């Protein structure tokens, strides 16, 4: 059953959302969009838990994996705005134990730190202090292909530690205090215990989670994307851990409003947001073989257009299909969340963003 509403002119977005369930086998999902500060799409439907039959409701909270990186990016940018750190400084200025002395904050944010995996292993995956200490003493990879390689999990330990060294708070506490509470967002980096009952249950169809063959030193197994990882994702320990790269929970409405506030300049100024989405690096990700582009933590437009068609898009997607971001030229902020992860290509988010794009093309902005 599909619930929610759309503003006049956005009915095709609702039709596409329903088509995801009827034709593309969607399990449970939500999609929301703001335009120039007004909520224009707020949809949800399906099951929050396949095994129990619990329905997805208006306040269901969804793990957004790397969509969390957009939240942590905003925390870093606020520290920049306050003059507490500079993107051009070496990370070691703020974190003296970090031995890769020439690696800058901007390089960390744009996935150029050459620390895309943890050589000491992931036995303490949910212990930030242990994992950050491992990365502090790990030598950057010398393989030239590692110069621009997506730091799926390690990005979070590096960025979270930077926030702690500069401000004293964890990324999760900082985001809550500076963004979520003032803006009344249903968005968390690390879910409070009393909210676990609102979380959906994640599932992965057969074949989506795979072991990486040890045929290339650059191919390292992602401990969150191997068979059986659903047990980790759905555990209370993971929900509470607050991993700054992959541990965010949110409603689609909350994530869309977060990006809407980035467009409005309510906490981060428009100049700071421009700094954050200014391109730092673009190129082919060596393990995926496809183009990626990054500003200071935000994903930017690439040929795959997985954050929608506009050239000025910025935001961050999440593993398995979620998509969150903004189209400044159209005053649009959006979020799609779902609890069944899929491999690419995945039509679910793309179909919704295409319909949203068409709707905004035919609707003039408010006077």
Image: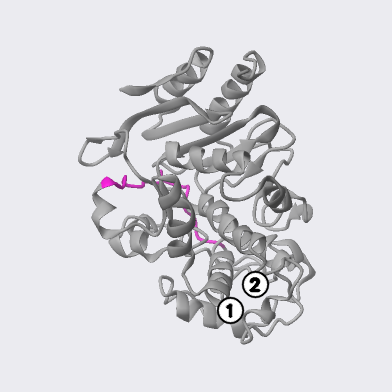
Query: Is residue 292 toward the left or the right of residue 347 in the image?
Result: right
- In the picture, the quarter occupied by the N terminus is top left
Residue found 57% across the figure and 44% down from its top: 266
Q: Position of residue 96 (x, y in %)?
A: 64, 86
Q: Position of residue 138 (x, y in %)?
A: 63, 82
Q: Residues within 10 Å of mark 2 (few under 14, many from 20)?
A: many
Q: Residues within 10 Å of mark 1 (few under 14, many from 20)?
A: many
Query: Is residue 218 toward the left or the right of residue 267 in the image?
Result: right
Tag on residue 135?
1
Seen from the viewer's position, the closer of residues 100 and 321 is 100
Secondary structure beneath dot 1 equals helix
Q: Visible in this render: residue 292?
A: no
Secondary structure beneath dot 2 equals loop
Q: Visible in this render: residue 164?
A: yes
Query: Is residue 155 toward the left or the right of residue 169 in the image?
Result: right
Residue found 41% across the figure and 46% down from its top: 250
Tag on residue 293?
none
In this picture, is 331 found above or below 181? above
Q: Position of residue 237 (x, y in %)?
A: 32, 65
Residue found 27% across the figure and 53% down from its top: 196
Cα separation between marks 2 and 1 = 7 Å
Q: Earlier in the sequence, mark 2 or mark 1?
A: 2
Identify residue for label 2.
115
Residue found 59% across the figure and 47% down from its top: 316
| Residue 216 occupies quadrant | bottom right
Q: Which residues are magenta?
A: 198-212
Query: Do residues under tags 2 and 1 come within 8 Å of each other at their CB atoms?
Result: yes
Q: Position of residue 110 (x, y in %)?
A: 70, 60
């Amino acid at each position: 059953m599909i619930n929610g509403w759309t503003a006049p002119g956005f009915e095709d977005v609702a039709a596409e959302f329903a088509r995801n369930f009827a034709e593309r086998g969607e399990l449970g999902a939500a999609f929301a969009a703001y335009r120039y500060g007004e909520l224009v799409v707020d949809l949800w439907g399906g099951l929050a838990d396949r095994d129990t039959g619990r329905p997805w409701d208006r306040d269901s909270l969804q793990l957004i994996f790397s969509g969390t990186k957009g939240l942590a990016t905003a925390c870093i940018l606020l520290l920049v705005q306050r003059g507490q750190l500079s993107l051009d400084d070496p990370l070691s200025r703020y974190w003296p134990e970090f031995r890769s002395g020439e690696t800058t904050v901007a390089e960390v944010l744009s996935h150029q730190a050459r620390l895309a995996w943890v050589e000491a292993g992931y036995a303490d995956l949910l212990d930030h202090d242990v994992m950050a200490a491992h990365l502090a003493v790990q030598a950057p990879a010398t393989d030239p292909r590692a110069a621009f390689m997506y730091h799926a999990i390690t990005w979070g330990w590096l960025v979270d530690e930077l926030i702690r060294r500069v401000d004293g708070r964890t990324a999760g506490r900082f985001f809550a205090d500076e963004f979520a509470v003032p803006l009344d967002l249903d968005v968390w980096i690390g879910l409070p215990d009393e909210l676990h009952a609102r979380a959906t249950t994640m599932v992965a169809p057969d074949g989506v989670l795979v072991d990486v063959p040890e045929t290339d030193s650059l191919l390292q197994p992602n401990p969150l994307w191997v068979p059986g990882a659903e047990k980790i994702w759905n555990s209370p320990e993971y929900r509470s851990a607050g991993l700054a790269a992959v541990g965010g929970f949110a409603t689609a409405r909350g994530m869309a409003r977060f990006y809407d506030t980035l467009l409005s300049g309510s906490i981060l100024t428009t100049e700071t947001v421009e700094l954050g989405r200014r391109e730092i690096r673009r190129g082919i990700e060596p393990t995926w073989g496809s183009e990626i582009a990054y500003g200071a933590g935000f994903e930017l437009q690439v040929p795959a257009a997985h954050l929608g068609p506009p050239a000025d898009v910025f935001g961050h997607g999440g593993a398995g299909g979620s998509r969150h971001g903004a189209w400044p030229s159209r005053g649009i902020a959006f979020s799609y969340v779902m609890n069944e992860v899929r491999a690419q290509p995945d039509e679910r988010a793309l179909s919704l963003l295409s319909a949203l794009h068409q709707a905004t093309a035919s609707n003039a902005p408010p006077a």
